């Protein structure tokens, strides 16, 4: 029997296996998704970053289903199941992911809903944005809580969330399971770009991308060896059986959103195996934006730039035996000279992207043409990858290259050299200036408004001025509360709790809290005396509707009222305050839990009041509008 015949027989037998049947069913579900495509344009706006928000029209109220971030108005594409939809777009001038008065806005599908069916995509949706437009149907257009909205697809929710590499979602076992059940991985929240620590504008992010059937834990040796003084680790988790173009688009969308959120200046990428193909496709998309030279360093480890010859067996399956869904998996893209690989290499890497290629080989390999036991050398050293600035051979297996000491030494040197070249491009001072106002000790809780003319009309300015006067009159009493023995004692109790230093414990508490066990967790982990002190204070000073004190790792230390969640460090306001170590204010808005309009003030509490501003905790105070 020929090798081709054996391959056909084996693949035919495998197609009857449970794992592939599960994969087939899930790929078929994904293939039922359609696209709503169109273009946004601004009529009287500056052409700033734009949010395109998709609402499903299923009942009385529109339901937020998906969104897309654009660096400026232009073409957009939103993935959704068949249904009736409303699309709203607005320029996010202050980059806070919610619509503020004066930000240009437009929509399609308000009076005549957009209908997407399973037969074809919906194209040609035009949205003109103007300053005079108002959100349809009273929509708040607030995406600041998108991380907690179960209606939003997991890849969109999990953009920049803090996560531990030890989380079971990112284990090797779950990585293999995700390949068989991509929808299951999505349900577990195991798709997205995750942070190991809060974002720091003074350090360059290094994004780690695993390979086929892999997981972020595969790259643990590199993440743990990273110089944390100069760099901050991010990792991308994904099910590797999805089409590589779709995976690269998920990554591109996530980095685009993070770029707008944090005003990213530089990003480095380290990828293993098939992750190098995903990353190269993402870099191509990013370069095409022509807005900023973001990705300046690209390191690949045993990447099959020429494809995987064994994947060609998929082309040998007779048409009568080949299910349609088999054309919708990454194996098709891995076939040498596939359409994906042709498109991937159609244009050379941008000259500002330094590519360092590490290739692996086993001296005693019986693999045809040599290789690392998985990927042949002819693929790792494909002629189309000769654009790499340097190539490094390593005597190691396909997985062994991840722990090879010499590879780690060279990667560390490459990163250090790139830092010397690029760190001057980082502008943490501009990041802080754009997103926060420093409040000196003499003017704590000052609510002076930045760029008033862009965001607030005359009525709002007058309302805010009244709040400024009310808070100013109570500054001394509020400062006394924040330095009171009850609050300081609560933070000390938080620090003494071993669970507060363990991210997994914090997240487990948060899950219990959200699942309806809030009262029990409150009694277990927050300080009762501090809770009572804060509650009494809000009764004495009713303009302070709610006060939340979180410890240095983001869990609740005490609170005036029971919050909707326990873990605050995955909220944008908490991350921003922890990163900038500055007090700041939010927008004038309606707070549902307090049933009132008001402004939230965010205050970082220094440890021992030292000049180093080490974080002891963060206080959020909701100032109620009378």
Image: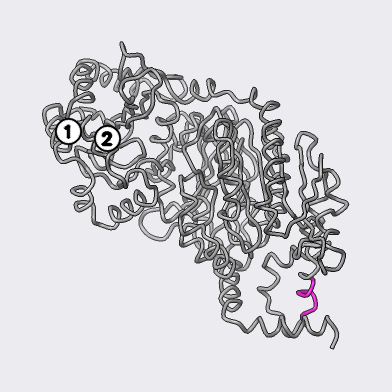
Q: In which quarter of the image is the N terminus?
A: bottom right
Instruction: Depth check: give the residue in front, 133 or 206.
Output: 206
- What residue range appears in magenta? 312-317
Q: Residue 218 carries which label?
A: none
Q: Is residue 278 left or right of residue 19?
A: right
Q: In this view, does 358 lie to the left or right of 548?
A: right
Which quadrant of the figure has residue 128?
top right
Q: Where is residue 563 in the image (x, y as percent from the top left)?
A: 26, 44
Q: Residue at x 46, y 34 (%)?
A: 96
Q: Which residue is drawn at 84% across and 63% down?
A: 370
Pick whichever of labels 1 and 2 is earlier in the sequence: 1
Residue tagged 2? 549
Q: In this view, does 112 lie to the left or right of 447?
A: right
Work out whether residue 86 can be spotted: no
> As displayed, is residue 276 above or below residue 533?
below
Q: Position of residue 196 (x, y in %)?
A: 49, 43
Are the residues flagged by discs 1 and 2 in contact, CB closer than 8 Å?
Answer: yes
Q: Which residue is drawn at 80% across and 35% down?
A: 351
Residue tagged 1? 534
Q: Quadrant of the C terminus?
A: top left
Report how far apart the C-alphas of labels 1 and 2 lie in the structure.
10 Å
Q: Magenta span has 314?
A: yes
């Amino acid at each position: 029997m020929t090798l081709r015949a054996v391959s056909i027989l084996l693949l035919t037998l495998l197609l009857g296996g449970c794992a592939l049947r599960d994969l087939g069913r899930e790929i078929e579900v994904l293939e039922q998704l359609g696209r709503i495509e169109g273009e946004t344009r601004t009529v009287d706006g500056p052409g700033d970053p734009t949010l395109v928000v998709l609402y499903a029209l299923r009942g009385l109220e529109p339901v937020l289903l998906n969104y897309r971030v654009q660096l400026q108005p232009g073409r957009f594409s939103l993935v959704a199941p068949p249904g009736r939809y409303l699309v709203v777009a607005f320029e996010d001038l202050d980059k806070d992911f919610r619509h503020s008065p004066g930000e240009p806005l437009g929509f399609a599908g308000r009076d005549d809903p957009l209908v997407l069916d399973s037969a074809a995509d919906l194209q040609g949706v035009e949205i003109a944005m103007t300053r005079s437009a108002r959100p349809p149907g009273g929509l708040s257009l607030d995406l600041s809580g998108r991380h907690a909205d179960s209606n939003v697809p997991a890849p969109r929710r999990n953009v920049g969330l803090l996560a531990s590499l030890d989380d079971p979602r990112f284990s090797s076992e779950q990585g293999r399971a995700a390949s068989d059940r991509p929808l299951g991985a999505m349900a577990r929240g195991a798709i997205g770009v995750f942070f190991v620590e809060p974002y720091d504008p003074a350090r360059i992010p290094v994004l780690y991308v695993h390979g086929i059937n892999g997981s972020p834990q595969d790259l643990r040796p590199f993440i743990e060896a990273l110089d944390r003084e100069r760099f901050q680790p991010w990792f991308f988790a994904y099910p590797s059986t999805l089409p590589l173009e779709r995976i690269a688009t998920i990554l591109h969308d996530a980095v685009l959103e993070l770029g707008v959120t944090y005003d990213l200046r530089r990003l480095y990428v380290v990828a293993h195996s098939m992750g190098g193909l995903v990353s190269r496709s993402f870099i191509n998309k990013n370069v095409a934006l022509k807005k900023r030279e973001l990705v300046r360093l690209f390191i690949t480890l045993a990447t099959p730039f020429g494809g995987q010859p064994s994947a060609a067996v998929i082309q040998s399956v007779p048409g009568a035996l080949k299910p349609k869904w088999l054309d919708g998996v990454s194996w098709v893209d891995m076939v040498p000279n596939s359409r994906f690989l042709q498109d991937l290499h159609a244009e050379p890497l941008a000259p500002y992207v330094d590519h360092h290629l590490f290739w692996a080989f086993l001296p005693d390999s019986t693999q045809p043409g040599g290789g690392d036991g998985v990927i042949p050398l002819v693929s790792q050293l494909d002629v189309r990858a000769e654009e790499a600035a340097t190539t490094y051979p390593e005597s190691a297996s396909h997985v062994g290259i991840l722990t090879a000491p010499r590879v780690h030494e060279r990667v560390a040197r490459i990163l250090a050299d790139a830092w010397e070249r690029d760190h001057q491009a980082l502008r943490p001072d501009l990041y802080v200036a754009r997103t926060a106002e420093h409040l000196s000790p003499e003017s704590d809780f000052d609510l002076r408004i930045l760029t008033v003319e862009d965001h607030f009309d005359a009525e709002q300015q007058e309302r805010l001025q009244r709040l400024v006067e009310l808070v100013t009159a109570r500054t001394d009493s509020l400062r006394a509360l924040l330095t009171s023995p009850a609050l300081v004692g609560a933070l000390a109790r938080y620090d003494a709790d071993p669970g507060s230093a363990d991210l997994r414990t914090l997240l487990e508490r948060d899950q219990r809290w959200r699942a309806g066990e809030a009262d029990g967790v409150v009694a277990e982990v927050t300080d009762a005396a501090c809770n009572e002190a804060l509650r009494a204070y809000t009764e004495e000073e009713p303009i302070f509707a709610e006060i939340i004190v979180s410890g240095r790792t983001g869990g609740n230390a005490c609170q005036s009222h029971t919050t909707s969640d326990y873990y605050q460090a995955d909220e944008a306001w908490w991350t921003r305050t922890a990163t900038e170590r500055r007090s700041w204010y939010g927008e004038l808005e309606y707070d549902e839990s307090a049933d009132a309009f008001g402004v939230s003030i965010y205050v970082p509490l220094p440890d021992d009041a030292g000049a180093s501003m080490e974080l002891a905790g963060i206080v959020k105070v909701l100032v109620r509008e009378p």
